[in-house]
Image (cartoon, rainbow, N blue to C red):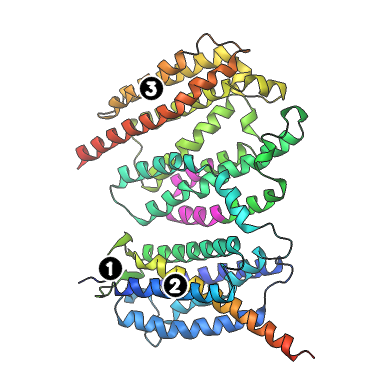
Amino acid sequence: MTGLGYLVCLVLGIGCMLLIDWRFRLFFWRAPGAAALVTAAGVTFLLLWDAAGIAAGVFLRGTADIASGIVLAPELPLEEPLFLVFLVLCTMVIHTGTVRLLSTRRRRSQP
Amino acid sequence: MTYALLSTGFLFVAVLLGVLMARRSGQPGVSWPATAVTLVVLVVLTAVFDSIMIGLELFSYAPEHISGLVIGLAPVEDFAYPVAIAVALPALWALLTRRNAVPMGELVRQATAASRPISWINTAFPFAAAMVLTTREVNWVLVVGALYYLIPYNLAMYGINDVFDYESDVNNPRKGSIEGALLPRRFHRPLLWLVLATNLPFLVVLLLAGGPASWVAITVSTFAVVAYSAPGLRLKERPVWDSITSSTHFVSPAVVGFTLAGGTVEPGVVLVLGSFFLWGMAAHAFGAVQDIVPDRQAGIGSIATALGARGTVRLSLALWALAGLLVLAAPWPAPLAAVVPVPYLINCASSLRVTDTTAASTNRAWRRFIYLNYFAGFLVTLIMIDFWIRMS
């Protein structure tokens, strides 16, 4: 059995992160070039980590019904790079959002 | 314990890079409180969502390679991922968005243009073809290596070239600013950093994936990329070495692919790669003829300034002919590739009467040459497919 459930969840997740980014101008909507480089660097680093794990025989692709079953390389499903993009976006939205919150609080507490 | 070791290694690299980048990030710098918040939030999210994903059987772990310690359903080793990116990515972001940094969007555009996207395939294809024809399977090393020889390798080769050609052009008033204008000076250092950042991780992985033979091949390949234009060596200005290095740029990815695949050195392989090498030398030498006049004016050496226009054209013809003869001696179907140099010979022969003063006129033949490459690539691919079918 294969399905698109996981893929759809990831695309929606990425979409939600980008919506928050757009609304508060945090990451791509603040410095698109830098954001693209951070995303590319993050995803590449994590993919190499995955690759090392797969090569070492640690990671095995699952048999979930909600996975598309499409593989990009041995044991590497189509969904994995998208998951890593989501993870990087999530990290940077949380980080830049926290920086924003902390600085507004500091500004408010000043007389 | 394999996974614990692996995760510790990657986590160490990420934290080390994070600290180094944070120290160079200037103003406004990394917000450590925000980094701490990010870390905590990500770890909690990982505990929840990793458990859900494992519960849904999206992926699993080889039991003999994990410690067995879990949080929820997630192995503790998994938590190295969120910790690594929570530390490293904000540091990278701070570095790239510091106040006096060059605009990154512009850097990405400059870097993409510098990497010559039209030529990406010229290095990725030899690597992938050599590897896949040897292993006869698509594995991880192939994917990582093909990606490396597609983009980062070309960024290194042409990026380093553009940076250091600028220096030599600026010091040389006669060459003017036409070529110097290619890559503005303020992008030089960021571009060299980008070259290092995009090449090093791939090279480390490829070195780890191979043995002594591929270490030698990767070292030679990387040396050729740097030494072609880096100051001090500048092999591109040393006659004959320029053609040898230039050919190495395109043949070495194939040798790396072959050695990573663990191929055994047979006469046929040596003949085919040797033929490819001679083809590359001929191509470089012929291309240098059109620049004889400006190069001599600028005092820059090349194989063509040393041998003269007609001598270089003759040498190119000889090298192409020899390339064809070499594959004739290789096992079937490689001899079919002997027809590949024929159009090059005809094209180049049209320049046989060239003199040093009319050298620039070979530019017309050179432009035809670029189209011939596509035709040659098509023929070679057909022969490779034939080879593949015969082997299976």
- Choose top left, top right, bottom left or bottom right for residue B23: bottom right
How far is disc 3 from disc 1 in space, using C-alphas? 46 Å
* Front disc: 1 or 2: 2
Towards the viewer: B83 or A28 = A28
The reply, left or right, for residue B362 in relation to residue A61 is right
The residue drawn where x is 40% and y is 40% is B126
The reply, left or right, for residue B355 in relation to residue B273 is right
Task: Tell me the magenta residue range.
Answer: B198-220
Q: Which residue is mark 3?
A: B341
Numbered mark located on residue A68 in the image: 1
In the rendered image of this protein, does residue B296 appear above or below residue B102?
above
How far is disc 1 from disc 2 in space, using C-alphas? 19 Å
Local SS, label 2: helix
- Disc 3 + disc 1, Cβ < 8 Å: no
Local SS, label 3: helix
In the rendered image of this protein, does residue B277 appear above or below residue A6?
above
Chain ID, mark 3 = B
Numbered mark located on residue A15 in the image: 2
- Choose top left, top right, bottom left or bottom right for residue B40: bottom right
Q: Amino acid at mark 2?
A: Gly
N-terminal of the two: label 1 or label 2? 2
- Choose top left, top right, bottom left or bottom right for residue B182: top right
